[in-house]
Amino acid sequence: MVKLCALRLLLSSLFSDLQFAYYICSLQKTIDRYKAYTRENVNYKAVQQDIQQVKADALSLANRLEALEKSKRKFLGENLEDCSVEELHSLEVKLEKSLHVIRGKKTQLLEQQIAKLKEKERTLLKDNKELREKQRNLQLPLVSPVPNRCLPPWPRNLPAPPCDDSMDVETELYIGLPGRERSSNRDSG
Protein backbone atom coordinates (compact mmCIF):
# COMPACT_ATOMS: atom_id res chain seq x y z
CA MET A 1 0.00 0.00 0.00
CA VAL A 2 2.80 2.34 0.71
CA LYS A 3 4.04 1.57 -2.69
CA LEU A 4 0.66 2.38 -4.13
CA CYS A 5 0.51 5.71 -2.32
CA ALA A 6 3.99 6.60 -3.42
CA LEU A 7 3.07 5.72 -6.95
CA ARG A 8 -0.02 7.93 -6.74
CA LEU A 9 2.00 10.77 -5.32
CA LEU A 10 4.59 10.33 -8.01
CA LEU A 11 1.94 10.20 -10.72
CA SER A 12 0.08 13.20 -9.37
CA SER A 13 3.26 15.26 -9.10
CA LEU A 14 4.26 14.13 -12.55
CA PHE A 15 0.80 14.93 -13.86
CA SER A 16 0.94 18.37 -12.22
CA ASP A 17 4.30 19.07 -13.84
CA LEU A 18 2.96 17.99 -17.22
CA GLN A 19 -0.15 20.03 -16.69
CA PHE A 20 1.96 23.04 -15.67
CA ALA A 21 4.19 22.57 -18.71
CA TYR A 22 1.08 22.37 -20.91
CA TYR A 23 -0.21 25.60 -19.44
CA ILE A 24 3.16 27.31 -19.93
CA CYS A 25 3.30 26.09 -23.52
CA SER A 26 -0.28 27.17 -24.07
CA LEU A 27 0.42 30.58 -22.55
CA GLN A 28 3.46 31.01 -24.82
CA LYS A 29 1.32 30.14 -27.86
CA THR A 30 -1.25 32.72 -26.78
CA ILE A 31 1.45 35.39 -26.43
CA ASP A 32 2.86 34.49 -29.86
CA ARG A 33 -0.61 34.69 -31.38
CA TYR A 34 -1.14 38.10 -29.78
CA LYS A 35 2.16 39.39 -31.14
CA ALA A 36 1.36 38.07 -34.62
CA TYR A 37 -2.11 39.64 -34.50
CA THR A 38 -0.80 43.03 -33.42
CA ARG A 39 1.96 42.84 -36.03
CA GLU A 40 -0.61 41.99 -38.70
CA ASN A 41 -2.85 44.81 -37.53
CA VAL A 42 0.02 47.27 -37.69
CA ASN A 43 0.79 46.07 -41.24
CA TYR A 44 -2.91 46.11 -42.06
CA LYS A 45 -3.19 49.70 -40.91
CA ALA A 46 -0.14 50.70 -42.94
CA VAL A 47 -1.52 48.91 -45.98
CA GLN A 48 -4.89 50.60 -45.51
CA GLN A 49 -3.17 54.00 -45.32
CA ASP A 50 -1.21 53.21 -48.49
CA ILE A 51 -4.39 52.15 -50.27
CA GLN A 52 -6.14 55.36 -49.23
CA GLN A 53 -3.16 57.40 -50.48
CA VAL A 54 -3.15 55.57 -53.83
CA LYS A 55 -6.91 56.13 -54.18
CA ALA A 56 -6.47 59.84 -53.45
CA ASP A 57 -3.63 60.08 -55.99
CA ALA A 58 -5.71 58.26 -58.61
CA LEU A 59 -8.65 60.60 -58.01
CA SER A 60 -6.36 63.63 -58.27
CA LEU A 61 -4.89 62.33 -61.53
CA ALA A 62 -8.35 61.61 -62.92
CA ASN A 63 -9.45 65.17 -62.11
CA ARG A 64 -6.29 66.58 -63.67
CA LEU A 65 -6.78 64.44 -66.78
CA GLU A 66 -10.36 65.66 -67.12
CA ALA A 67 -9.20 69.28 -66.82
CA LEU A 68 -6.57 68.67 -69.51
CA GLU A 69 -9.18 67.07 -71.78
CA LYS A 70 -11.46 70.11 -71.34
CA SER A 71 -8.56 72.43 -72.11
CA LYS A 72 -7.65 70.38 -75.19
CA ARG A 73 -11.24 70.51 -76.46
CA LYS A 74 -11.25 74.29 -76.01
CA PHE A 75 -8.00 74.60 -77.97
CA LEU A 76 -9.64 72.55 -80.72
CA GLY A 77 -12.60 74.94 -80.73
CA GLU A 78 -15.05 72.50 -79.13
CA ASN A 79 -17.41 73.23 -76.21
CA LEU A 80 -16.82 76.99 -76.28
CA GLU A 81 -20.44 77.81 -75.43
CA ASP A 82 -19.72 78.02 -71.68
CA CYS A 83 -16.66 80.30 -72.07
CA SER A 84 -16.73 83.96 -71.12
CA VAL A 85 -15.22 86.69 -73.28
CA GLU A 86 -12.18 86.82 -71.00
CA GLU A 87 -11.66 83.06 -71.29
CA LEU A 88 -11.96 83.24 -75.08
CA HIS A 89 -9.48 86.13 -75.21
CA SER A 90 -7.04 84.20 -72.99
CA LEU A 91 -7.46 81.16 -75.22
CA GLU A 92 -6.79 83.28 -78.32
CA VAL A 93 -3.60 84.73 -76.79
CA LYS A 94 -2.35 81.25 -75.87
CA LEU A 95 -3.05 80.00 -79.40
CA GLU A 96 -1.21 82.95 -80.96
CA LYS A 97 1.81 82.31 -78.71
CA SER A 98 1.73 78.63 -79.65
CA LEU A 99 1.52 79.48 -83.36
CA HIS A 100 4.48 81.83 -82.99
CA VAL A 101 6.56 79.09 -81.35
CA ILE A 102 5.47 76.51 -83.96
CA ARG A 103 6.25 78.82 -86.87
CA GLY A 104 9.64 79.64 -85.36
CA LYS A 105 10.48 75.96 -85.06
CA LYS A 106 9.26 75.32 -88.61
CA THR A 107 11.40 78.19 -89.93
CA GLN A 108 14.41 76.85 -88.06
CA LEU A 109 13.94 73.37 -89.54
CA LEU A 110 13.47 74.76 -93.06
CA GLU A 111 16.63 76.86 -92.72
CA GLN A 112 18.55 73.77 -91.61
CA GLN A 113 17.22 71.83 -94.60
CA ILE A 114 18.16 74.67 -96.96
CA ALA A 115 21.68 74.78 -95.52
CA LYS A 116 22.03 71.01 -96.00
CA LEU A 117 20.75 71.24 -99.57
CA LYS A 118 23.14 74.12 -100.37
CA GLU A 119 26.01 72.08 -98.99
CA LYS A 120 24.90 69.13 -101.11
CA GLU A 121 24.67 71.44 -104.15
CA ARG A 122 28.24 72.68 -103.54
CA THR A 123 29.45 69.09 -103.25
CA LEU A 124 27.67 68.05 -106.44
CA LEU A 125 28.99 71.08 -108.35
CA LYS A 126 32.50 70.28 -107.16
CA ASP A 127 32.10 66.63 -108.19
CA ASN A 128 30.68 67.72 -111.56
CA LYS A 129 33.63 70.06 -112.11
CA GLU A 130 36.07 67.27 -111.27
CA LEU A 131 34.31 64.89 -113.66
CA ARG A 132 34.39 67.46 -116.48
CA GLU A 133 38.09 67.99 -115.85
CA LYS A 134 38.71 64.23 -116.01
CA GLN A 135 36.68 64.05 -119.21
CA ARG A 136 38.73 66.84 -120.78
CA ASN A 137 41.92 65.09 -119.75
CA LEU A 138 40.76 61.96 -121.49
CA GLN A 139 39.83 64.05 -124.56
CA LEU A 140 36.50 62.32 -124.95
CA PRO A 141 33.58 64.28 -126.33
CA LEU A 142 30.67 64.88 -123.98
CA VAL A 143 28.20 63.65 -126.60
CA SER A 144 29.09 61.34 -129.44
CA PRO A 145 28.73 63.30 -132.68
CA VAL A 146 25.82 62.52 -134.98
CA PRO A 147 27.08 61.91 -138.52
CA ASN A 148 26.03 64.66 -140.91
CA ARG A 149 24.50 63.26 -144.07
CA CYS A 150 25.41 66.28 -146.12
CA LEU A 151 29.03 66.70 -145.15
CA PRO A 152 31.72 64.04 -145.16
CA PRO A 153 33.07 63.08 -141.73
CA TRP A 154 35.64 65.56 -140.47
CA PRO A 155 39.04 64.12 -139.53
CA ARG A 156 39.70 64.11 -135.78
CA ASN A 157 43.20 65.49 -135.98
CA LEU A 158 42.02 68.70 -137.73
CA PRO A 159 40.25 71.52 -135.93
CA ALA A 160 36.50 71.71 -136.53
CA PRO A 161 35.26 74.19 -139.13
CA PRO A 162 33.80 77.40 -137.76
CA CYS A 163 30.06 77.34 -137.22
CA ASP A 164 27.89 79.98 -138.79
CA ASP A 165 25.02 80.42 -136.35
CA SER A 166 23.75 83.48 -138.19
CA MET A 167 22.50 81.44 -141.16
CA ASP A 168 18.87 82.24 -142.00
CA VAL A 169 16.69 79.20 -142.32
CA GLU A 170 12.98 79.21 -142.99
CA THR A 171 10.98 76.45 -141.42
CA GLU A 172 7.32 75.64 -141.68
CA LEU A 173 5.12 73.35 -139.65
CA TYR A 174 2.19 71.63 -141.31
CA ILE A 175 -0.38 69.43 -139.69
CA GLY A 176 -2.31 67.08 -141.90
CA LEU A 177 -1.67 65.05 -145.00
CA PRO A 178 1.34 66.07 -147.04
CA GLY A 179 0.67 68.23 -150.04
CA ARG A 180 -2.87 69.44 -149.34
CA GLU A 181 -2.21 72.14 -146.72
CA ARG A 182 0.93 73.42 -148.36
CA SER A 183 -0.70 74.02 -151.70
CA SER A 184 -3.69 75.87 -150.20
CA ASN A 185 -1.47 78.11 -148.02
CA ARG A 186 0.87 78.93 -150.89
CA ASP A 187 -2.00 79.81 -153.19
CA SER A 188 -3.47 82.28 -150.70
CA GLY A 189 -0.10 83.85 -149.80
Image (cartoon, rainbow, N blue to C red):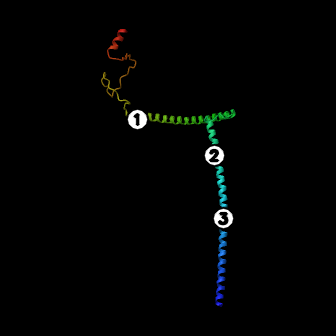
Instruction: Residue under label 2, please give it.
Output: 62
Quarter of the image with the N terminus is bottom right
Q: Which tag is nearer the camera, tag 1 or tag 2?
A: 2
Residue for point 66% across, 56% down = 48
| Amino acid at dot 3 | Tyr
29 versus 16 height, above or below: above
23, 116: nearer the viewer? 23
Dots 2 and 3: beta carbons under 8 Å? Answer: no
Q: Position of residue 67 (x, y in %)?
A: 64, 42
Looking at marks 3 and 1 on the same chain, the residue that comes earlier in the sequence is marked by 3
34, 106: nearer the viewer? 34
Instruction: Residue under label 1, please give it.
Output: 134
Residue for point 65% across, 62% down = 40
154, 95: nearer the viewer? 95
Give the spatial CA distance, label 2 vs label 3.
36 Å
| Amino acid at dot 1 | Lys
Dots 3 and 1: beta carbons under 8 Å? Answer: no
Looking at marks 1 and 2 on the same chain, the residue that comes earlier in the sequence is marked by 2
Q: Position of residue 13 (x, y in %)?
A: 66, 83
Give the spatial CA distance, label 3 vs label 1.
94 Å
| Amino acid at dot 2 | Ala
Looking at marks 2 and 3 on the same chain, the residue that comes earlier in the sequence is marked by 3
